[in-house]
Image: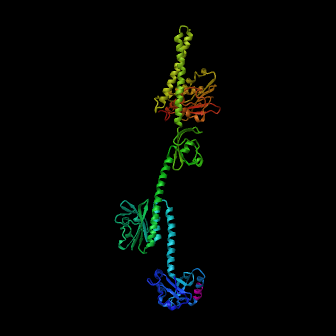
């Protein structure tokens, strides 16, 4: 801005130096004239050289009255302050000062004055220019700014609080409560869009009975909002009409502020702020729009969280209920999950394996590996890689029974072939000898050959009987004839000829004279007793004492057969009663047989209402214990 030098006559200024649009000075003067704040320029002698319309309104003097004279606006007691400001800005810089000034009517008012120097194009000091702001305007602006800052800060806290909730109903209730707090609304709510209906799913300061009430979407404000393609709207007076769902429950309602919540790019619901006492303006609408946007995000997060929780619960239920052992390994091969079946199958608890490698070897992804644990359990192990995370899922199941059955079948075939081959070879050899050398053989030789053939044929018949009885023993019911009989007599008959069978064994039978009769099948008991005695001889190849003893025990008679043989390992004391299983864990062909004897023994004993079990002897060997019901006692007959 160029003004006359201070040494020129003031009469040249007059009223021509007003800064109204269209006067000399062009655009610059138009800008000063249109400024909302009072602008006053003075020369070095403090004579007014510019006095814009805002200054006229603020101080009460017109430009014509002020141009060329010193403005009487500075109180005398503030003259030193005024001079200090001019001196400060003359030496460089600007000064903003809150002070007091006079109006034309002599009243004092608070004002903020921003003062700077006025220079020529060459930098020569021409005077000073001051811009005046009413202090109350500053306070109002500051208050608005402070309130906006406070609300924005509170909105941040509210959003954090909303997002802290995980359950969708909690999220919606917090949104409704926060809506009233931020906007100052008298009540609020959240309605869900469900097809062509609205449903009130959250409310604040509205009756609880309104929750889950519904309304027609098309006739509602939400419908209007959607049709107009807006995200927020403010409805007042008679137009403030949702339906009788909400507004009729709030006496004095005059304004509704509405904000659309969008989830996944689609309208999900809407926030309602209801005003009955306070007024709503642009700031409330702006806050509502911000909150609605955050509400959509919070609802989306809560929905995704609920779905994740549901999916995780489903996966966990499957994981925990699976009969297969399941383990999850991270990308480094360390166990992160270990289900209950895995603990049961391996004997390792989750706390023992999580964080470390699995306790067995793994196949490659997509392959199967059959392994045996130190406990003897056989596992089929499968692995599958989760490409997206680098994790590995390991599934393993117990195949011990299948493995044992497979081995038992192989052993049965091998054993049966061996057991059949030996007598058949002998029979065929002696029959061939008789056929080709009959005339050259003596009667004694011929009788010996025929006797051998007969003995081997008897062995074959006994083997076939065992196989047949073994297949029948697995049936639900064996055709037995239950009757009362003298067990002591049966034992004496079965052991009478045993001492002559072996020079290495001694037979001892200890039966009390008052041993009560038992209830059962005589033939079946004779078969199982014979098998127990045969095993006692077979599994004590180095000889020793074989002792048979019986006594009454409650409602049963207990019979035991003791030997001093190789014994049965603890792990095999139950397995020896299964089909095709032998007790000796070393050379399985050492004692021969097809592994059906004790299976038949237990099947026959239980079919009679009794039982049989294997026990170790303190001095070595095995005790086989048979229990049968005493005659004429409850449960004796089956």
The answer to which image quadrant residue 83 occupies is: bottom right
Give whichever of 514, 331 is nearer the camera: 331
All told, the count of numbered labels is: 0
Give whichever of 142, 466 is nearer the camera: 142
Determine if residue 307 is in view.
Answer: yes
Determine if residue 483 is in view.
Answer: no
Residue ID at (55%, 84%): 128
Q: Looking at the image, is 396 positioned above or below residue 59?
A: above
Give whichever of 212, 498 is nearer the camera: 212
Q: Looking at the image, is 40 positioned above or below residue 567?
A: below
Please, which residue is most extreme toward the front here? 122
- Position of 44 with respect to 215 (left or right) is right
> Which colour scheme appears in the figure?
rainbow
Give whichever of 4, 634 is nearer the camera: 4
14 inside magenta stretch? no
Q: Of helix, strand and loop, which mostly describes the magenta segment?
A: helix
Give residue 288's position: percent from left, percent from top: 44, 68
Q: Looking at the image, is 393 positioned above or below residue 406?
A: below
The answer to which image quadrant residue 245 occupies is: bottom left
Task: Look at the image and give the residue range highlighted in magenta.
Answer: 78-85
Give residue 303's position: percent from left, percent from top: 46, 58
Please, which residue is most extreme toward the top here? 439
Give residue 557's position: percent from left, percent from top: 55, 32
Please, which residue is most extreme toward the left here? 219
Give residue 122's position: percent from left, percent from top: 56, 81
């Amino acid at each position: 801005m160029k003004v006359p030098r201070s040494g020129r006559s003031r009469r040249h200024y007059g009223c021509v130096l007003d800064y109204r649009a269209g006067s000399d000075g062009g655009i610059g003067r138009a800008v000063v004239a249109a400024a909302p704040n009072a602008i006053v320029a003075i020369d070095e002698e403090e004579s007014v050289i510019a006095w814009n319309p805002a200054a006229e309104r603020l101080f009460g003097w017109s430009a014509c009255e002020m141009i060329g004279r010193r403005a009487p606006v500075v109180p005398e007691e503030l003259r030193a302050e005024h001079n200090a400001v001019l001196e400060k800005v003359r030496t460089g810089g600007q000064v903003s000062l809150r002070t007091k000034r006079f109006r034309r009517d002599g009243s004092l008012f608070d004002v903020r004055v921003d003062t700077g120097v006025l220079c020529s194009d060459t930098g020569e000091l021409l005077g000073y220019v001051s811009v005046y702001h009413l202090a109350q305007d500053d306070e109002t602006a500051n208050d608005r700014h402070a309130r906006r800052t406070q609300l924005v800060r509170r909105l941040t806290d509210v959003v954090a609080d909303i997002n802290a909730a995980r359950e969708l109903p909690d999220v919606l209730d917090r949104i409704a409560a926060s809506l009233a707090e931020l906007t100052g609304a008298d009540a609020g709510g959240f309605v869900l869009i469900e097809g062509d209906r609205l449903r009130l799913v959250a409310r604040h300061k509205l009756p609880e009975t309104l929750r889950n009430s519904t309304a027609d979407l098309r006739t509602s404000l939400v419908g209007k909002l959607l049709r107009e393609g807006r995200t927020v709207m403010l409805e007042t007076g008679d137009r403030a009409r949702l339906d009788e769902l909400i507004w009729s429950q709030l006496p004095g309602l005059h304004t509704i502020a509405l904000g659309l919540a969008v989830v996944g790019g689609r309208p999900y619901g809407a926030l309602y702020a209801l005003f009955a006492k306070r007024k709503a303006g642009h700031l409330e609408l702006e806050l509502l729009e911000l909150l609605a946007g955050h509400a959509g995000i919070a609802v989306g997060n809560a929905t995704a969280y609920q779905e994740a929780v549901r999916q995780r619960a489903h996966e966990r239920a499957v994981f925990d209920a699976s009969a297969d052992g399941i383990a999850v390994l991270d990308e480094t091969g360390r166990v992160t999950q270990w289900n209950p079946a895995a603990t049961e199958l391996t004997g390792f608890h989750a706390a023992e394996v999580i964080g470390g490698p699995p306790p067995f070897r793994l196949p490659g992804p997509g392959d199967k590996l059959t392994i045996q644990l130190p406990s003897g359990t056989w596992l089929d192990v499968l692995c599958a890689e989760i490409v997206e995370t680098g994790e590995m899922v390991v599934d393993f199941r117990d195949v011990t029974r299948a493995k044992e059955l497979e081995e038992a079948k192989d052993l049965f075939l091998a054993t049966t072939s061996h057991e059949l081959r030996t007598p058949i070879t002998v029979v065929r050899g002696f029959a061939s000898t008789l056929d080709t050398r009959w005339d050259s053989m003596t009667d004694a030789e011929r009788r010996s050959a025929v006797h051998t053939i007969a003995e081997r044929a008897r062995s074959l018949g006994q083997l076939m009987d065992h196989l047949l009885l073994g297949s029948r023993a697995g049936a639900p019911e064996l055709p037995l004839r239950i009757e009362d009989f003298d067990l002591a007599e049966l034992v004496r008959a079965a052991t009478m000829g045993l001492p002559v069978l072996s020079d290495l064994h001694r037979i001892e039978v200890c039966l009390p004279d008052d041993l009560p009769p038992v209830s059962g099948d005589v033939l079946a008991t004779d078969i199982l007793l014979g098998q127990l005695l045969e095993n006692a001889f077979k599994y004590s190849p180095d000889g020793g004492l074989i002792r048979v003893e019986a006594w009454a025990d409650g409602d049963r008679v207990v019979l035991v057969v003791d030997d001093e043989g190789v014994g049965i390992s603890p792990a095999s004391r139950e397995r020896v009663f299964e089909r095709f299983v032998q007790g000796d864990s070393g050379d399985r062909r050492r004692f021969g047989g097809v592994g059906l004897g004790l299976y038949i023994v237990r099947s026959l004993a239980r079919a009679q209402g009794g039982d049989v079990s294997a026990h170790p002897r303190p001095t070595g060997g095995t005790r086989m214990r048979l229990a049968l019901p005493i005659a004429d006692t409850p449960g004796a007959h089956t």
